[in-house]
Image (tube, rainbow, N blue to C red):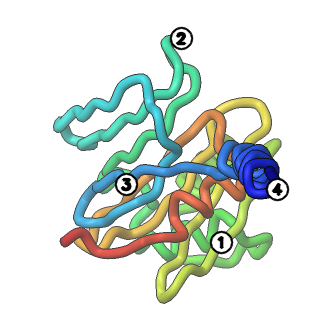
Amino acid sequence: MKKTALLIGLACTSLPACAQTDQFITAAYDGMKFQVPESPVIVGSLGADNDILLVKYSHTIGKQYISFGTENTLETGGCKWSDFFEATLSKDKAHSCDKASVESFQKVFIEGGDSGTWEIGDKAYYHFLSDQGASFVFFQSNNGNLIKLESDFLDADGFLRVLGDLQAEE
């Protein structure tokens, strides 16, 4: 009887622990692996100029998504990507990037949100987070492409979880 009660008690305490465990699946993009939340409604890829991978978690158009896109055509005002993002995030107006390009990017991505740089390993991840819509993280892939990670529901911790288990695609 004691064994049965112990097993029932153990089973009851184990179920909530399992239910609270966040589950993730691996998404591969541009030679890298990322951890995204499990159970997407749909996963799709569009191989045009921006080569987009979309992971959707809702049937509602434009809601609950994570996307990975190649942004090699981003207008940086003649700067390297890292210099451009540092210029957009800096309060210092003295930089070598085109002023109009920097100001345009700031108006779209920085105003009204949280922005900064995350350092993971030897890479910089430039984040632009919003409470009102889509949030973005830009970084250079292992293949040398500029990647834009976008989501309308991930917060800073969610983005870091997606990025935190970075590894080369085997």
The 10 Å Cα crowd at callout 2, few under 14, some 14 to 19, many 20 or more, is: few
Q: Which residue is mark 1?
A: 117
Q: Which residue is mark 3?
A: 26
**Three-letter residue code for mark 1:** Thr
Q: Which residue is mark 4?
A: 2
User: Looking at this view, is 47 or 17 the one in front?
Assistant: 17
- Spatial separation of the CA atoms under disc 2 and disc 1: 31 Å
Residue shown at 77% from the left, 44% from the top: 12
Q: Which mark is residue 16?
A: none
Quarter of image, res 142: bottom left
Mark 2 vs mark 3: give the one in front: 3
Residue shown at 55% from the left, 56% from the top: 137
Mark 2 vs mark 1: give the one in front: 2
User: Looking at this view, is 93 or 48 the one in front?
Assistant: 48
Residue 2 higher or lower than 95, as above or below: above
Residue 41 higher or lower than 138, as above or below: above
Task: Look at the image and tell me whether residue 129 can be seen.
Answer: no
N-terminal of the pair, mark 4 or mark 2, is 4
**Element on which disc 2 rests:** loop
Mark 1 vs mark 3: give the one in front: 3
**Three-letter residue code for mark 3:** Thr
N-terminal of the pair, mark 2 or mark 3, is 3
Instruction: Tell me whether the residue at label 1 lies in contact with that at label 3, contact meaning CB atoms closer than 8 angstroms.
Output: no
- Spatial separation of the CA atoms under disc 4 and disc 3: 42 Å
Q: Which residue is mark 2?
A: 60
**Three-letter residue code for mark 2:** Thr
**Three-letter residue code for mark 4:** Lys
Instruction: Tell me whether the residue at label 2 lies in contact with that at label 1, contact meaning CB atoms closer than 8 angstroms.
Output: no
**Element on which disc 4 rests:** helix
